[in-house]
Amino acid sequence: MKYTIVNMVAAASLDQNLDLYSLAVGIPNIEYEPEQFPGAILKIKEPKVSMLLFKNGKVICSGANSEEQIEQGIRKANKMIHEVQKEVKIKRHIEFEIVNFVATASLDINLDLFDVAMNLDNVEYEPEQFPGAILRMDEPKLTFLLFKNGKMICAGAKKEAHLKQGLKLVEEMVKKRSKKKKALE
């Protein structure tokens, strides 16, 4: 099944403490409201990613759709921080761990979401709350949003292999259910 990765979230560390207040004053595109959230939000235009920066030097990068964009975003953030806080060294290579893949895909069939919710395990469907069914999978641990038109969103994968495995399992479950339903009609 074809899918498109629409967001990757990665965690990294600059291994140095950050003064978020001085960063907020020194870098124009940082939002920092410590009474609302303990980190600063840095939006980078190219690549188009958002970085959450924390006092302990931890960094969360979101909005990327490739590892290359994550690397570029973290490197760019590191340089911007160094320009304001000279004691924060520019690291040549910053290791990061992808903590979430979000992808879209299509089953290429229309779904009866009531039927899916009634006949598959771990599916919630409350159309007055949300137009899609929520399918939670334990192995691999993923969450899928399923829509009537057969489109779906998958979140929670820590590895692309888990994403592929989950998409294949959902496709098998839903298509098997569709065949059973047609046989009963």
Image (cartoon, rainbow, N blue to C red):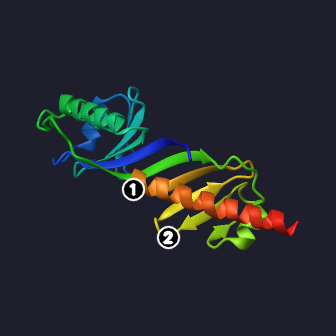
Q: Position of residue 19 (x, y in %)?
A: 22, 43
How many neighbours does mark 2 have within 10 angstroms: few (below 14), some (14-19), or many (20 or more)?
few
Above or below, 47 relative to 174: above
Q: Position of residue 166 (x, y in %)?
A: 51, 59
User: Given the image, on which type of amino acid does mark 2 rest?
Assistant: Asp
Q: Position of residue 48 (x, y in %)?
A: 42, 31
- Residue sitting at x 41%, y 51%: 160
| Local SS, label 1 | loop
Q: Which residue is mark 2?
A: 138
State the residue in front, 176 or 111: 176
Q: Is residue 57 left or right of residue 130?
A: left
- Residue sitting at x 47%, y 68%: 139
Q: Is residue 34 left or right of residue 22?
A: right
Q: Is residue 143 left or right of residue 70?
A: right
Q: Which residue is mark 1?
A: 158
Residue 43 image-quadrant placement: top left
Which quadrant, please, contains the C terminus? bottom right
- Residue sitting at x 41%, y 38%: 64
Q: Counting residues from the N terminus, which is met first, the one under dot 2 or under dot 1?
A: 2
Q: From this viewpoint, is residue 37 visible?
A: no
Q: CA distance from mark 2 to mark 1?
A: 13 Å
